[in-house]
Image (cartoon, rainbow, N blue to C red):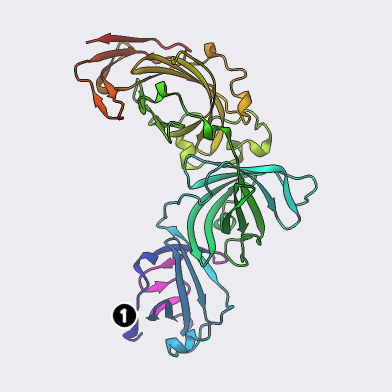
């Protein structure tokens, strides 16, 4: 190889291993070489002349970086040596466009562009619209994931009940056309786990119909972007319509949100209120705990975990998001029963919650163990005598220890002023003594120091 190759290099951020539909194994790219294509011989802008040593020939690659995890290119046949300009001129406008998706090093998924779930939607796989009964799209605690719950329509042959999880990996825009690359897990087809089965390309467009936000989406039929022209033409098309849920107008009571952050006595769980006191986020640093299933999803197509989904946020289940849906009853700013919409991993539904004010810095809560698809059913059979209490405090912890089966915690109260300024009341110290139990009641003893 002559000295020309020494000056030719591919971009550093392209280095890694890439998947391309139809190519066996992954494609390695380093600073001078693209596996199965050849060595970088000459470059000019987005045009690269590469030398294929095995065939002793040259080809032109026109490479476009659409996203840090997406490369698209057109190429010529491998030919005898000629100038870069001459060989590259043989790429015509309608030449095949190939897409490569980065596998390693992995790129962190991005927030899905479809705001704000939940949605109802209809879909078409080429044999007619399936919109009745409506399908539903639900958000996950990780905004890079979306759960699509497809319903079957009796009069549409290709429709079927199925649950898919979409992980959003890359987006870009060409003119007014918006593209998305995602990976799909299909729960009732456990064998479909290859990259060929999971990578899909989408074109999407945001609009409004009857005052509601609507997303028109077209999906590719394979792991390429070939054949996608518009958000209404594809192997499968969908129209997502935002759901006008009641809980967008509900707020947790002020006596609960006076402290925006509460912690459990063992400090494993943190409760944070946000979004103008409409959303409660629960962070749990404990290891795996059971994942609850929709009570109403007894049908096989909706048994979410039974379908094989095991994303990392579900395995750890360390974050739960609850949105106030409706306040059922409240007693003297000391007790309230609330229906909340909960999302944990990619599972979601409605739960019943009770909040009890014990002191300005102490609160206890109870939460139903089941998720319900219908908000009206969440508190219908709720029995506080059968539900364990979780004690929450707004205190700064100075230290703790265990002795004879009891846990001792030394704390200082947190004070929140009217201007939301937070500070510790260092004039006081409290000792909490508690014992973890599986029983509904939990004994808590508080003493001043």
Q: Is residue 182 magenta?
A: no
Q: Secondary structure at mark 1?
A: helix
Q: Is residue 225 left or right of residue 399?
A: right
Residue 406's image quarter? top left
Residue pointed to by mark 1 = 7
Residue 265 on image: x %, y %: 35, 20
Q: Which residues are magenta?
A: 21-40
Q: Residues within 10 Å of mark 1 (few under 14, many from 20)?
A: few
Residue that appears at 59% across and 78% down? 94
Residue 322 on image: x %, y %: 49, 31
Please tell me whether the stretch drawn in magenta is mainly helix, strand or loop. loop
Residue that appears at 33% across and 18% down? 361
Please identify the quadrant where the C terminus is shown: top left
Residue 117 on image: x %, y %: 55, 43
Answer above or below: position of 255 versus 300: above
Answer above or below: position of 68 versus 289: below
The one of 409 and 248 positioned closer to us in this rendering = 248
Residue farthest to the left, as pictured:
427
The one of 209 and 104 positioned closer to us in this rendering = 209
Answer above or below: position of 441 versus 78: above
Q: Is residue 99 left or right of residue 39?
A: right
Please identify the quadrant where the N terminus is shown: bottom left
Residue that appears at 59% across and 54% down? 207
Q: Is residue 35 magenta?
A: yes
Q: Is residue 214 visible?
A: yes
Answer above or below: position of 51 versus 29: below
Residue 153 on image: x %, y %: 75, 45
């Amino acid at each position: 190889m002559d000295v020309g190759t020494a000056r030719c290099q591919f971009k550093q951020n392209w280095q890694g291993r890439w998947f391309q539909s139809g190519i066996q194994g992954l494609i390695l790219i380093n600073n001078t070489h693209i596996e199965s294509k050849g060595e970088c011989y000459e470059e000019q802008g987005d045009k690269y002349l590469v030398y294929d040593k095995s065939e002793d020939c040259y080809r032109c690659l026109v490479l476009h970086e659409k996203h840090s995890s997406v490369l698209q290119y057109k190429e010529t046949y491998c030919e005898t040596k000629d100038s870069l300009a001459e060989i590259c001129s043989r790429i015509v406008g309608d030449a095949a466009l190939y897409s490569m998706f980065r596998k390693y090093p992995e790129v962190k998924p991005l927030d899905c562009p479809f705001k704000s779930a939940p949605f109802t939607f209809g879909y078409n796989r080429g044999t007619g619209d399936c919109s009745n009964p409506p399908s539903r799209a639900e958000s996950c605690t990780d905004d890079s994931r979306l759960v699509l719950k497809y319903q079957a329509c009796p009069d549409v042959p290709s429709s079927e009940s199925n649950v898919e999880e979409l992980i959003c990996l890359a987006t870009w825009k060409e003119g007014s056309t918006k593209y998305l690359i995602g990976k799909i897990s299909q729960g009732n087809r456990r064998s479909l786990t290859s990259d060929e089965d999971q990578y899909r390309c989408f074109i999407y467009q945001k609009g409004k119909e009857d005052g509601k936000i609507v997303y028109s989406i077209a999906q590719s039929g394979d792991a390429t972007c070939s054949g996608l022209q518009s958000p209404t033409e594809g192997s499968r098309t969908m129209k997502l319509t935002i759901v006008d849920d009641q809980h967008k107008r509900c707020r947790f009571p002020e006596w609960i949100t006076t402290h925006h952050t509460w912690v459990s006595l063992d400090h494993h769980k943190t409760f944070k209120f946000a979004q103008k006191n409409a959303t409660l986020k629960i962070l749990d640093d404990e290891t795996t705990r059971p994942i609850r299933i929709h009570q109403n999803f007894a049908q096989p197509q909706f048994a979410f975990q039974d379908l094989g989904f095991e994303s990392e946020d579900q395995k750890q289940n360390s974050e739960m998001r609850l949105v106030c849906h409706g306040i059922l009853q409240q007693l003297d700013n000391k007790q309230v029963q609330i229906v909340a919409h909960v999302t944990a991993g990619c599972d979601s539904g409605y739960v019943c919650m009770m909040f009890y004010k014990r002191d300005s810095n102490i609160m206890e809560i109870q939460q139903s163990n089941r998720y319900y698809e219908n908000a009206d059913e969440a508190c219908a059979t709720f029995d506080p005598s059968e539900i364990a209490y979780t004690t929450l405090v707004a205190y700064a912890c100075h230290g703790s220890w265990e002795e004879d089966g009891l846990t001792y915690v030394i704390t200082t109260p947190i004070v929140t002023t009217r201007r939301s300024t937070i500070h510790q009341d260092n004039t006081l110290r409290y000792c909490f003594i508690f014992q973890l139990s599986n029983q509904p009641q939990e004994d808590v003893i508080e003493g001043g120091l």
